[in-house]
Image: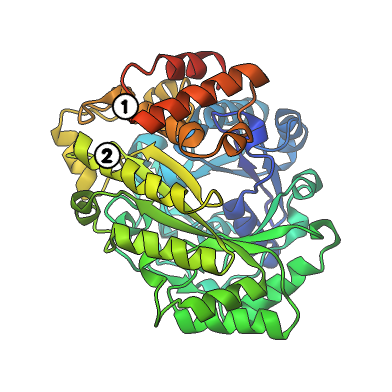
């Protein structure tokens, strides 16, 4: 059987921000391939400092390389691919992940890329490595001479038929640095949010059985190198099937599998009759310490536009109920959507203000700038506003190489107040919370400079005055780089 090396390239932000996480997608693919007898190894460039040396050392022994690529990984992914092509010209290079899935036509034109895997990769990778003719493999795009061949999409996996993670396939150095142990009890989401990758790709919800989830928790709880660490269920929505969720929680308590854990949930679910106060108490008893919510906006107009099917009142209620059960509620927000007005954005800030005043324990992520993904209604609005998306992988790579995350809002014509949108995440992060929480941020800087920045942010937040964000621009230029 031919061998495959799976690689997770570095991102465009400091490595220390990723050392405590893990590449769940690559581990799932590696686990599936291993279960089929395929020799497979993982190199995690986001968390292994010597990743290039490892690639140079290993690559001569591999027939295939699979590279997982998000947009912010493009520059390093291209660099790694070119290195592999030079060191092992016969090795077939496969790109998968969100960026190649959304931009498959662009991606496959890169000379160093042989195959693009569209969507989920476990079954597709196995078909490729096992030697099946490429024209018979669903879910890939490839070159055939001067022509580009796009095969039919692959059906979504039956999640309950794929094996639980085989931790031994992940490098020891990565496992030892984990702050949170990842688990995945389901994939996809049944809701229709227009900005979401799942809705765009029609990634319907599919789940593992209760017994499989409990077996996974049991394995994690008794792994020596996971002792004392919490678990993150990386589901898009853990509570889609509430009866299944209740059976998992009951099973954890009955079998003595209590372990610190966190996951995602919709704010509209947290109410009596669905996730009521009694169930929240039981979640806490099982070890749940944090629930993560996608609040997105405080504006009813924007919530309706993105088809979120919830209200700001749902968000406040979910926070109050979580706090009563001793569970930390965490909320993510975004701004800068096409058609969003300054008034809409201020309603989002108002909702954030109401949340942080409930308790200093509440965590706020963002508001991050909206990211346009092709295939959505919102993407078409962005195009109509005059935006020209990058046309090649090289163009994407060049634009993204100087950014901390996705493309800067300075490139987006639909965003009128660009400085406001770009700076707002920092002003919420350092201004909305207590000085203690703000100073505890992972951003590394001189203590007194950081304190001065925090105090300026708090003043701006109190006055709701965000014009002329000079200190933000200076911090972005000289600190966060």
Name the image quarter holding the C terminus.
Answer: top right
Q: Is residue 167 left or right of residue 11?
A: right
- Is 254 above or below relative to 231? below
- Is 465 above or below relative to 358? above
Q: Nearer the viewer, residue 379 or 79?
A: 379
Residue shown at the point (70%, 77%) measured from the top left: 215
Residue shown at the point (37%, 58%) measured from the top left: 198
Can residue 203 be seen by looking at this rendering? no
The residue positioned farthest toward the left in the image shown: 384
Q: Nearer the viewer, residue 412 or 255?
A: 255
Name the image quarter holding the N terminus.
Answer: bottom right
- In the picture, the disc for residue 420 is 1
Q: CA distance from mark 2 to mark 1?
A: 10 Å
Q: Is residue 237 left or right of residue 19?
A: left
Residue shown at the point (74%, 74%) measured from the top left: 218
Q: Nearer the viewer, residue 48 or 293?
A: 293
Q: Nearer the viewer, residue 478 or 44?
A: 478
SS at circle 1: helix
The type of colouring in the image is rainbow
Where residue 471 sits in the image (x, y, percent)? 45, 16
Q: Is residue 72 left or right of residue 31?
A: left
Q: Is residue 449 left or right of residue 241?
A: right
Residue shown at the point (40%, 67%) measured from the top left: 155
Where residue 44 sits in the image (x, y, percent)? 67, 41
**CB under 8 Å between callouts 2 and 1?**
yes
For disc 2, the neighbor class at 10 Å (few under 14, some 14 to 19, many from 20) is: many
- Is 117 above or below relative to 7? below
For disc 1, the neighbor class at 10 Å (few under 14, some 14 to 19, many from 20) is: many
- Which residue bears the numbered disc 2? 345
Where residue 72 sits in the image (x, y, percent)? 48, 33
């Amino acid at each position: 059987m031919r061998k495959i090396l799976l690689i997770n390239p570095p991102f465009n932000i400091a490595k220390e921000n990723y050392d405590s996480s893990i590449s769940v997608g690559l581990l799932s693919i590696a686990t599936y391939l291993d279960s089929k007898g395929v020799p497979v190894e993982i190199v995690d460039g986001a968390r292994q400092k010597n990743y290039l040396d490892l690639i140079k050392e290993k690559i001569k022994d591999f027939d295939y390389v699979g590279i997982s690529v998000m947009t912010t990984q493009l520059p390093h992914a291209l660099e790694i691919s070119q290195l592999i092509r030079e060191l092992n010209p016969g090795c077939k290079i496969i790109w998968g992940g969100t960026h190649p899935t959304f931009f498959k036509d662009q991606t496959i034109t890169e000379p160093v890329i042989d195959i693009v895997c569209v969507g989920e990769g476990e079954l597709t990778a196995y078909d490729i490595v096992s030697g099946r003719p490429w024209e018979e493999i669903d879910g890939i795009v490839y070159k055939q001479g001067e022509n580009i061949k796009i095969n039919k999409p692959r059906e979504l996996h039956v999640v309950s038929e794929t094996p639980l993670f085989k931790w031994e396939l992940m490098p020891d150095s990565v496992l030892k640095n984990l702050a949170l142990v990842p688990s995945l009890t389901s994939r996809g989401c049944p809701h229709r949010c227009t900005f979401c990758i799942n809705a765009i790709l029609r990634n319907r919800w599919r789940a593992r059985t209760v017994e499989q989830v409990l077996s996974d928790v049991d394995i994690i709880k008794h792994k020596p190198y996971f002792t004392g660490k919490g678990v993150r269920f990386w589901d898009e929505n853990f509570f889609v099937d509430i009866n299944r969720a209740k059976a998992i929680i009951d099973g954890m308590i009955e079998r003595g599998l209590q372990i610190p854990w966190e996951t995602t949930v919709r704010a509209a679910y947290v109410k009596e009759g669905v996730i009521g106060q009694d169930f929240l108490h039981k979640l806490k008893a099982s070890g749940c310490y944090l629930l993560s919510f996608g609040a997105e906006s405080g504006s009813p107009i924007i919530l309706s536009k993105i088809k979120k099917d919830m209200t700001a009142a749902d968000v406040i209620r979910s926070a109050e109920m979580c706090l009563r059960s001793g569970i930390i509620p965490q909320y993510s927000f975004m701004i800068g959507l096409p058609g969003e007005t300054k008034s809409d954005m201020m309603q989002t800030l108002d909702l954030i203000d109401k949340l942080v005043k409930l308790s200093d324990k509440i965590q706020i992520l963002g508001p991050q700038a909206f990211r346009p993904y092709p295939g959505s209604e919102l993407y078409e609005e962005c195009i109509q506003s005059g935006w020209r998306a990058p046309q090649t992988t090289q163009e994407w790579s060049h634009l993204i190489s100087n950014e901390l995350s996705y493309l800067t809002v300075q490139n987006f014509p639909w965003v009128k107040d660009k400085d406001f949108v770009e700076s707002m995440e920092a002003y919420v992060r350092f201004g909305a919370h207590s000085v203690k929480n703000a100073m505890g941020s992972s951003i590394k800087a001189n203590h007194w400079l950081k304190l001065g920045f925090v105090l300026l942010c708090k003043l701006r937040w109190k006055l709701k005055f965000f014009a002329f964000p000079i200190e933000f621009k200076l911090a972005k230029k000289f600190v966060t780089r």
